[in-house]
Structure formats: C-alpha cells, structure tokens
Image (cartoon, rainbow, N blue to C red):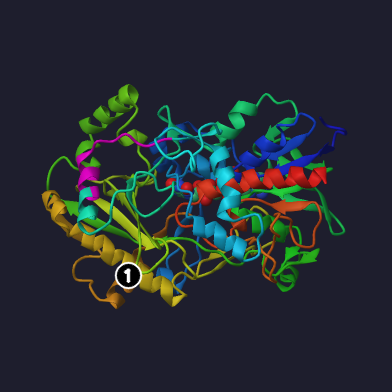
Amino acid sequence: MNDRASVESYDYIVVGAGSAGAAVANRLSADARHRVLLLEAGPAGHPWSRIPIGYARLLTNPAVNWLYSGEPEPSTNGRRIPVPRGRLLGGSSALNGLAFVRGQAQDFDSWAQMGNSGWSYADVLPLFKRMERYEGDGDDAFRGRNGPLRVTDPDWHDPFFATVIEAAGQVGIAHNPDYNGARQDGIAMSQATIASRQRMSTARCYLDPVRRRRNLRIETGAMTEGLVLDGKRCVGVRYVAAAGPREARAGGDVIVCAGSINSPQLLELSGIGQPDRLQALGIAVRHALPGVGENLRDHYAPRTRWAVGAKGFTFNDRGRGLGLVRQALRYVLQGDGLLAMVGAPIRAFVRSREGLAAPDLLLGWVPMLTEPSPRGPRIARQSGFTCYAHPMRPESRGHVHIVTADPRRPPAIRFNFLSAPIDAELTVRALRIARSIMNAPAMKRLQLTELAPGPDRSTDEQIVDWVKKAAETTYHPVGTCKMGGDAMAVVDARLRVHGIDGLRVADASIMPTLTSGNTNAPTIMIGEKAADMVLADARG
Ligand SMILES: Cc1cc2nc3c(=O)[nH]c(=O)nc-3n(C[C@H](O)[C@H](O)[C@H](O)COP(=O)(O)OP(=O)(O)OC[C@H]3O[C@@H](n4cnc5c(N)ncnc54)[C@H](O)[C@@H]3O)c2cc1C
C-alpha cells in the first residue's frame, strides 16, 4: 500500500479508532476500491476490556486511558476531576460503562432546527437501526436487528433492582421496557453493549469483522501529531508510530475522530483555531476558527450514597471474598452477575416538572459502594449503593485548549459546571427526586441510611455546596468542534471543517448540545452518518 517509503498514500485517513472512528473506517473500507488508513494512538486492546466489569480496572490505567483531568474551578470546589478517555482500539467504547442509550427524538430534531439539515430524528433513526443488532424485545419500527453492534437487555432477577423499580413506581415513575423505543420516560434496566458475556466495543463489532480487508490498514501505537495542509486544503497527516515519524497523504478526506478532547487539540496543533491563542504558543495560524475547543458540555453528576442495613441486597455483601468467587463462577457458567454488570444497571429518565415535552433528568443506580484504590475503584466493606442524578441537557459550557505546541502534553479542560443557573436548579431537583424514591415504601425493606449528601443537607444552597465538593461527570464530554452554521461552529452539517477542504471531524465533539443520556450510541451514529456523507460527496 505504500507508494513511497516515507510518504504513504490513501483515499481516506481516519484519525482515532474510537466509537465513531471505528464505524467510519468500517463503512469507508466496505468498498474494496477505497484505500483506508485508520490511525490509533493506543494499543490494540487490553484483557480487562473484554470483561464488562473490567472498566473498573481501566479507569486509572495509563496504558489504555488518556487520564485527563479538569482544571480546578469554583464549580468543583477547586478539585481536578478525572476525565478518563479510552486510548486503545475502540476508544472510550472499550472502557466505558456499557449502557446503551440513544437519547430522545427531540435531541436530534433540535440539531436540525439549528440549521443542521439531515440530522432530525427521522433522518438519524435509520442509522440507529442500521448500526445495532438488538437482541431484546422492542418495536422494529425503532430497533435494528442486523447491524454490527450487539445490544442486549440484562436478564437480572435481582432483589435490589426489583426494589428500586417498585419504589420508583410508588412515586409515579413507571417501568419502561424500552427507553430506546417510542418513549424515553420511566425507569428501566440499562440496555447494554454486552453480548456472550463480553463487552461489545466498536473494536469488537466494527473492526474485528473487517480486519482482513486488504484495503484497510489499522495502525495502532500511531499518534497523529499534525494535519498536513496545502493552503486551505488538508492533504494528509503527520504521525509517530513505533517505527518513527511518518506522513500519510489522502486523495480524499481526512476524518478526525479523536474525541472531544483530542480532536480540538489536533486542530489547534495544526494551526486551526483561535489566532491569539495559537500565536501565543508559537503556532502558525493556518485558519482562524474561533469555535475550536469551545462549547464543552458534560454531565456533572453528583453521586448520592446510601448505606443498606438489610443483608444480601448489594454487591458489598455478595461480591467480596467467597462472594466474589461465586460471582466469578456465575459469570463463567451463566454469563451474568457482578462481572457482567453495566456501570449503572438501572436508570430512570424523569421530568423535573409537569408540562415538559420529554424527560430532562437522569438518575442511575450502582448496586454497591466502592472506595478508591491505586488499581481503580474497589468494592467497599460497607453495604450500600450510589445513585447519581443530573440534568440531561445542561446549558453550562466550558472549553478545551492546548497549552503548549507539544502534542504529548494534555490540553487544559475547563468545564464551568453550573455556570448556567438552570443547571444548578435542575441538579437540586434531580437529587430531591432521588431522595423521594429512596423514601418510598418499598425501600423500607433495605433499611437505608443516607450517607451523602446526608439528611442535614436539605436547603438548595446546602445541596449545591455539596455538589461542588463531591460531583464528578459521567464522562460525556461533547461539543468542542460543534456542528452548525454560526460563527462558533467548527464543522458544517456534513461535518466538513469550515474553511478547510478535505477535512472533517466526526465524533462526540461535533454535537452542538448534549444528547439526553449517555453518548456512545449517538457517537457511533455520527460515525455511521459521516461515512455516508463522505461517500455521497465523493460520488458528487
Ligand atoms: C469511563 C467512561 C464511561 C462511560 N460510560 C458510558 C456508558 O455507559 N454509555 C455510553 O453511552 N457512553 C459512555 N461513555 C461515553 C462514551 O464512551 C463516549 O462518549 C464515546 O465513546 C466517545 O466516542 P468518540 O468517538 O468521540 O471518542 P473515543 O471513543 O474516545 O475515541 C477517540 C479515539 O481517538 C484516539 N486518539 C485520540 N487522539 C489521537 C491522535 N492524536 N492520534 C491517534 N489517535 C488518537 C483515542 O486514543 C481514541 O481511541 C463513557 C466514557 C468513559 C470514558
């Protein structure tokens, strides 16, 4: 495939093999005439990535995780909160919490209403269906059965989950068997990118089946350090692989799929961004684009903690010592239990007030208390659980920017959580709803004690104060290469970087707003749609 020893040439170059990039590379290389290079900075995989609960071991593992952190800021009470990001084939889909949530029809309709034609729910629903092989029940009008990504319903008859679902029902939150179907409202077991006991990352579902394609070269350990620009056209990339520095040229598009932190980083390193900022770092400005790195949004999610007095309900009782051995056996024999667990196995999509067209809050339960350890969170001795609660479409916006011209140095991430007053208001509302569920009659059988924020924190001010001291995100940064037509947009509705030919961004960074829920599913959809648009535009 190399035309020359030092400069390789391809039709398409995809930077980053994560949720979106793996999908893009798969679809572009389906036509054997297209020579596709997929560059991934991290390694091919990690043994813990295959086992669902293995994410706990990868959260702090520098071999497969970029391990970014946020800048200290008032909304975190001066803390640097963790910003884990996958750094291996599959990207963050290879170490995420495995919950499969598309979001609401309104999310995509609002993108279309902002002027992004082709992104309404009616437009993207066929892509959501095409990408999945959903193995649960559900309405075929909404669900796909033949796509690459295996999605399952966890088959759990567990007293903890049954109790929470019953308690939610008692405060008016009904069970919804398919929140990825016609309606999102209600409480449900989390659908999962888990099948046959194993994590279904995009590496597993989009790359493994096509590794033999001779027109697709997947290069791991290959860090892209800059885009090669010829005037206002991107013609290739510079990257560093095990064998040393390399350059690859693309006859067609370069598609940047490096994620919400690294995609704006790569644009800025290449001279595309805010001129003052780039000049201050000694980077020649190739194209002024003020929105690069702006519009960062994430779910700031305080975790309430509850002690459980009754025995046998949580994995603190059932997942330590001999219990852990039993869970391991159960995993091997039945494929379920602790080792096959989604990060938050139950979730509720609820409305903060009457009259809303759709839910605006998300609550999620984790059936154990954990404590930090050098190898990641471990199961605590005390029996209990956590319940996080947050607004799904926060309006606070931060930014991600490089602080040096060195591609190996992490960018500065500033979230500005709660800077929009509505976010603080809705966070308090979400936490009050969590408390109301925990106080419902069915929960009495668990014999609960509220550990955090604790019953003494009852006013809005006390709760917000605790949120600032305790909250972390649910790891959903988006928006830093926003799609749109306004002055702060980075890509247009076809994901082409404004003002630069031959360059697209396709990953979570293009989302103008956060989707209502977790971000893996919509990001894979973005990858699917990007590939369609690249191919359609090449046909002319
Ligand atoms: C710990 C954690 C838990 C999560 N839990 C869930 C969940 O339960 N459900 C859910 O839906 N979402 C979850 N998410 C979020 C979801 O996984 C991400 O939104 C999604 O994977 C982002 O996809 P992406 O394609 O934008 O980026 P990524 O999947 O992060 O992919 C970017 C890829 O580009 C590579 N890369 C970056 N820079 C370069 C470079 N310069 N050169 C070469 N390669 C580069 C990276 O190594 C990475 O592989 C979680 C995320 C994390 C981190």
> Residue 335: horizontal and vertical position, in percent?
35, 27
Label 1 residue SS: helix
In the image, farthest residue toward the top: 333
> Residue 208: horizontal and vertical position, in percent?
59, 28
Q: Nearer the viewer, residue 429 or 290?
A: 429
> Residue 291: horizontal and vertical position, in percent?
67, 67
Q: Which residues are magenta?
A: 152-165
Q: Is residue 308 left or right of residue 453?
A: left
Q: Residue at x 53, y 41 (%)?
A: 64
Circle 1 packing at 10 Å, graded few (<14), some (14-19), many (20+), is: many
Q: Is residue 241 above or below residue 276?
A: above
Q: Is residue 486 left or right of residue 74?
A: right
- The reply to whether residue 85 is in sight is no
Q: Is residue 161 above or below residue 412?
A: above
> Residue 95: horizontal and vertical position, in percent?
48, 42
Decide whether residue 100 is among the magenta residues: no
What residue is pinned by disc 1? 428
Kindly identify the amino acid type of the residue bearing the numbered disc 1: Val
Q: Nearer the viewer, residue 120 or 91?
A: 120
Decide whether residue 155 is among the magenta residues: yes
- The reply to whether residue 142 is in sight is yes
Image quarter where the N terminus lies is top right
Q: Is residue 213 above or below residue 98?
A: above
Q: Is residue 283 left or right of residue 346?
A: right
Q: Is residue 487 above or below residue 116?
A: below
